[in-house]
């Protein structure tokens, strides 16, 4: 028999999940109708998906370019941030006392700092250094705010790792690079993968930092394209199937990683 507290906890959990996922389900449902305005159902149709993949839509070049820019920037930023964040995490982990606490505190500030402040700060920095804003500045900006997330994901894996393994590898004749590549990296890989995925997602999602660092060359990512599209008086209907596809891809990746992680844990227990 379920007690009142357990029933309330279950209902509360499902209500929170419903609030979180209702907008996504709403967009997914209305991606299967041709209505231009969201919330207006004109009958089941997959024409928006056909239009999205065929390119037969208004300003299709702009949307495709925005998606390409978003993916390229996110991949580059997440990859560089993963490398830099992993090296930074190893350095912070090997510090001691107040110096280590100070570095951890400084690493947390960019994550807590509002995006608008980060965007304006980087914009002013690039202007002060006379750096032309465009692709390069957007990538540098994304690396800047993605790196702390990688550090945060890798540090716990360093704490779980046996500190004597690295020194044992050196004693057995391995060079510092070989010990790092063959001993430390395999142990840190789960944290690095988590940091990469989080960085990639944060880069895809970013608007404020991109808006302030892209300059005036017409560079658009998906977030800035949607913003400009909304200011014109409405959203391109094909954005509904695009958002649905992006969500399903991310969901599939997360399910794959979690299932693989669960299988690895079961194999270790056996």
Image: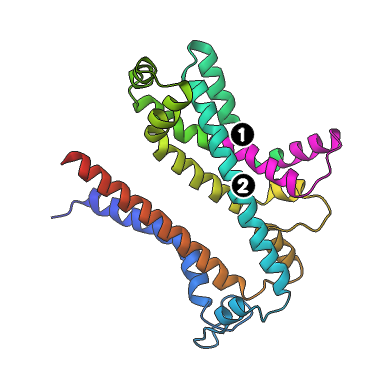
Q: Residues within 10 Å of mark 1 (few under 14, many from 20)?
A: some
Which of the two discs, 1 and 2, labels the residue nearer the N terminus? 2
Tell me the element at label 1: helix
- Would you place residue 177 above or below residue 10 in this image? above
The residue drawn where x is 60% and y is 30% is: 109
User: Which residue sits at x=58%, y=84%?
Assistant: 34
The disc label shown at residue 244, or none: none
Residue at 45% x, 43% y is 193
Query: Residue 23, how many percent across, how many down?
Result: 50, 65
**Along the horizontal axis of the image, is 231 left or right of 115?**
right
Q: Is residue 53 above or below residue 106?
A: below
Q: Is residue 231 visible?
A: yes
Q: Taking 135 as reference, is 46 left or right?
A: left
User: Which residue is label 2 attached to?
Assistant: 76
138 falls in the magenta region = yes
CA separation in Å, label 1 and label 2: 19 Å
Residue sitting at 78 percent across and 49 percent down? 134
Q: Which secondary structure is most common in the magenta stretch?
A: helix
């Amino acid at each position: 028999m379920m007690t009142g507290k357990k029933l309330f906890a279950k209902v509360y959990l499902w209500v929170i999940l419903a609030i979180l996922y209702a907008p996504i389900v709403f967009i997914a449902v209305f991606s299967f109708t041709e209505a231009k305005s969201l919330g207006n159902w004109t009958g089941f149709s997959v024409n928006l998906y056909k239009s999205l993949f065929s390119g037969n839509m208004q300003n299709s070049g702009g949307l495709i370019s925005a998606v390409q820019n978003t993916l390229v920037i996110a991949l580059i930023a997440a990859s560089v941030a993963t490398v830099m964040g992993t090296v930074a995490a190893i350095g912070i982990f090997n510090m001691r006392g107040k110096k280590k606490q100070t570095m951890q505190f400084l690493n947390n500030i960019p994550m807590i700092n509002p995006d608008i402040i980060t965007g304006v700060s980087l914009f002013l920095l690039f202007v002060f250094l006379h750096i032309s804003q465009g692709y390069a500045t957007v990538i540098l900006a994304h690396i800047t705010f993605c790196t702390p997330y990688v550090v945060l994901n890798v540090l716990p894996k360093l704490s779980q790792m046996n500190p004597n393994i690295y020194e044992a590898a050196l004693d057995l004749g391995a060079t510092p690079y070989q010990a790092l590549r063959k001993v430390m990296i395999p142990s840190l890989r789960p944290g690095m993968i988590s940091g990469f995925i989080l960085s990639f997602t944060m880069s895809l999602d970013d608007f404020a930092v991109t808006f302030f660092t892209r300059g005036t060359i017409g560079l658009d990512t998906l977030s800035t394209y949607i913003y400009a599209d909304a200011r014109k008086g409405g959203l391109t209907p094909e954005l509904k199937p695009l958002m649905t596809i992006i969500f399903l891809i991310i969901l599939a990746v997360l399910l794959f990683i979690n299932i693989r992680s669960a299988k690895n844990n079961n194999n270790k227990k056996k």
